[in-house]
Image (spheres, grey):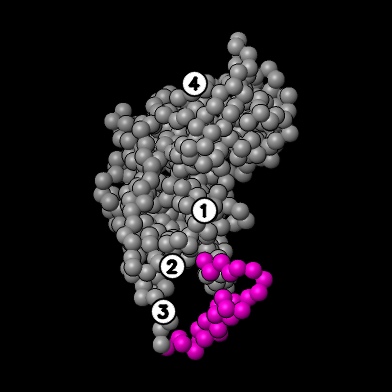
């Protein structure tokens, strides 16, 4: 089994990496984990490059993101600079803006209900303008929400850096929603270099109290939210360790880079398996490292697992697709004026040899950047897709900072497959559909089994890592 190189640094190719942007997208399923404080396997780092302009506009990031309910799926986005915009009302729009300025001045000069916070009034006006578009993928974010969303896009969060799960009273893995004496919160693994690792937390440590309060009765997500917190703040955990009993440990939270890549060998070493849970620059580089190792080992069969992957940076999607496609268009972007611009393969992929068979696993949680990659490999006849029809997110959002006022995301383009299909609202249909039984037993994976069969490998696996 080969593992992904854990150095990791955010999705950066564009400066802050081009982040994945899930307002919080669905957490990817990882066998054996019921929840995670840090994500799947490889940390990714991000750097946001900005060129400040004289107006209130700062960084502009273009991405493909989907907001469904509380979940934001991304296909990727570009991180770039925005030209200065001249403040003020254009002469041609004077009459149009007259009611706006009249309203603003009346509020500032005549509101008698208390002091007027001009910044909040302006933020509310910006929010109203964007909401008037009726686009679920365009929205205004407060400074705090904008910062946290960018962190999420780049695979970062603030916390202690440990994967958590649940076990029963005997310490055996158990899938349960509410913590109780027979559903205990446990450390699955601290992330390399994290505060959790530095204070000595170990796999199997049970968390019984958070800041002196019992965890019983909380959901796993509720407990996770209490453990997470702003960088520099502290959380006190009461740990129950086998053979040592209970003890308290105080941990100073920090910025944690989530792990995005899980890699292993299947079929007695004949198949290279790579699971990607997000699209950052670091994640894309980790995919390259794993594929290069597979090719060097002589493997001619590759499985790329994009199930539950909500997306991320456009450049990361380009780089991952380029690992399998040597040249030509990977996707197109269609702007507001109808102009279509292709994004071509980089020519630096590790597995572009047609002799290497590729299967991509997808499901309803595969969105945005995942769909860009899946559709590229499908349209270019480079891989077979196995699983379920994907989410169906085919637009690109640009994220723009407003200095001192948060920022907004705005739909600025459609993305199209190499054959110029627009999959928005429809998703990418798999070449081989696999239905998932409602009562599937723990440890079973019919989609992966079907992929292995397609590659001519016996489909019997033990997923315990």
Q: Is residue 249 in the magenta section?
A: no
Structural distance between the alpha carbons of marks 3 and 1: 26 Å
Residue 91 falls in image quadrant: bottom left
Separation of marks 3 and 4 at Cα, in angstroms:
56 Å
Label 1, secondary structure: give it: helix
Residue 32: x and y in percent read 58, 29
Can residue 20 be seen?
Answer: no
* Tag 2–tag 4 contact (CB < 8 Å): no
Q: Earlier in the sequence, mark 1 or mark 4?
A: 1
Marks 2 and 3, how far apart in space? Answer: 23 Å
Residue depth check, mark 1 versus mark 2: number of the one nearer the observer: 1
Q: Residue at x 60, y 11 (%)?
A: 244
Around disc 3, counting alpha carbons within 10 Å, would you say few (fewer than 14), some (14 to 19), or many (20 or more)? few
Q: Kindly check if marks 3 and 1 are in contact, taking CB atoms under 8 A apart as contact.
A: no
Residue range highlighted in magenta: 92-119
Q: Secondary structure at mark 2?
A: strand
Q: Nearer the viewer, mark 2 or mark 4?
A: 4
Q: Would you name the residue on which mark 4 appears?
A: 200
> Is there CB contact under 8 Å for labels 3 and 4?
no
In terms of secondary structure, where does tag 4 sit? loop
Contact flag, marks 1 and 2 (Cβ < 8 Å): no
Disc nearest the viewer among 3 and 4: 3
Q: Secondary structure at mark 3?
A: loop
Q: Which residue is mark 2?
A: 412
Mark 3 vs mark 1: which is more N-terminal?
3
Can you identify the residue that label 1 sits on?
144
Q: Nearer the viewer, residue 102 or 160?
A: 102
Q: Mark 2 to mark 4: distance in Å?
A: 47 Å
Q: Using the image as rendered, state which of residue 32 and residue 238 is in the foreground.
A: 238
The rendered magenta stretch, by its main secondary structure, is classed as helix
């Amino acid at each position: 089994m080969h593992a992904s190189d854990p150095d990791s640094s955010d999705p950066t190719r564009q400066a802050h990496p081009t982040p994945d942007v899930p307002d919080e997208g669905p957490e990817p399923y990882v066998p054996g984990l019921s929840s995670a404080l840090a994500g799947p396997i490889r940390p990714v780092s991000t750097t946001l490059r900005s060129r400040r302009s004289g107006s209130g506009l700062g960084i502009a990031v273009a991405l493909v993101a989907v907001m469904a309910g509380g979940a934001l799926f991304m296909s990727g986005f570009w991180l770039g600079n925005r030209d200065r915009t001249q403040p003020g009302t254009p002469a041609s729009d004077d009459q149009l803006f007259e009611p706006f300025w009249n309203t603003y001045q009346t509020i500032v000069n005549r509101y008698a209900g208390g002091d007027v916070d001009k910044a909040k009034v302006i933020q509310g006006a910006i929010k109203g303008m964007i909401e008037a578009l009726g686009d679920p993928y365009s929205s205004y974010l407060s400074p705090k929400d904008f910062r946290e969303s960018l962190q999420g896009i780049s695979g970062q969060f603030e916390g202690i850096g440990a994967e958590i799960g649940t076990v029963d009273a005997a310490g055996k893995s158990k899938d349960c929603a509410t913590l109780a004496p027979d559903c205990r919160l446990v450390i699955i693994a601290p992330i390399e270099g994290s505060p959790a690792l530095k204070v000595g937390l170990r796999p199997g440590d049970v968390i019984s109290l958070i800041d002196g309060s019992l965890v019983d009765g909380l959901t796993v997500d509720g407990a996770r939210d209490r453990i997470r917190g702003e960088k520099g703040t502290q959380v006190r955990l009461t740990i129950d360790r086998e053979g040592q009993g209970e003890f308290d440990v105080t941990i100073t939270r920090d910025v944690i880079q989530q792990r995005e890549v899980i890699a292993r060998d299947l079929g007695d070493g004949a198949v290279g398996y790579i699971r990607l849970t997000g699209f950052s620059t670091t994640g894309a580089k980790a995919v390259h490292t794993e594929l290069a190792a597979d090719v060097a080992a002589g493997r001619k069969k590759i499985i790329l697992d994009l199930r539950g992957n909500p997306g991320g940076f456009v450049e990361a999607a380009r780089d991952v697709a380029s690992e399998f496609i040597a040249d030509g268009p990977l996707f197109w972007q269609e702007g507001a004026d109808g102009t279509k611009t292709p994004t071509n393969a980089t020519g630096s992929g590790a597995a572009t040899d047609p002799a290497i068979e590729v299967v991509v696993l997808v499901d309803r949680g595969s969105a945005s950047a995942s769909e860009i990659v899946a559709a590229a490999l499908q349209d270019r006849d480079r891989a077979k897709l196995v699983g379920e029809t994907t989410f169906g997110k085919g637009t690109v959002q640009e994220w723009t900072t407003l200095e001192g006022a948060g920022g907004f995301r705005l739909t600025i383009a459609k993305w199209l497959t190499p054959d110029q299909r627009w999959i928005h609202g429809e998703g990418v249909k798999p070449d081989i559909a696999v239905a998932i039984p409602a009562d599937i037993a723990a440890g079973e994976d019919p989609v992966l089994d079907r992929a292995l069969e397609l590659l001519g490998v016996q489909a019997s696996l033990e997923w315990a890592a």
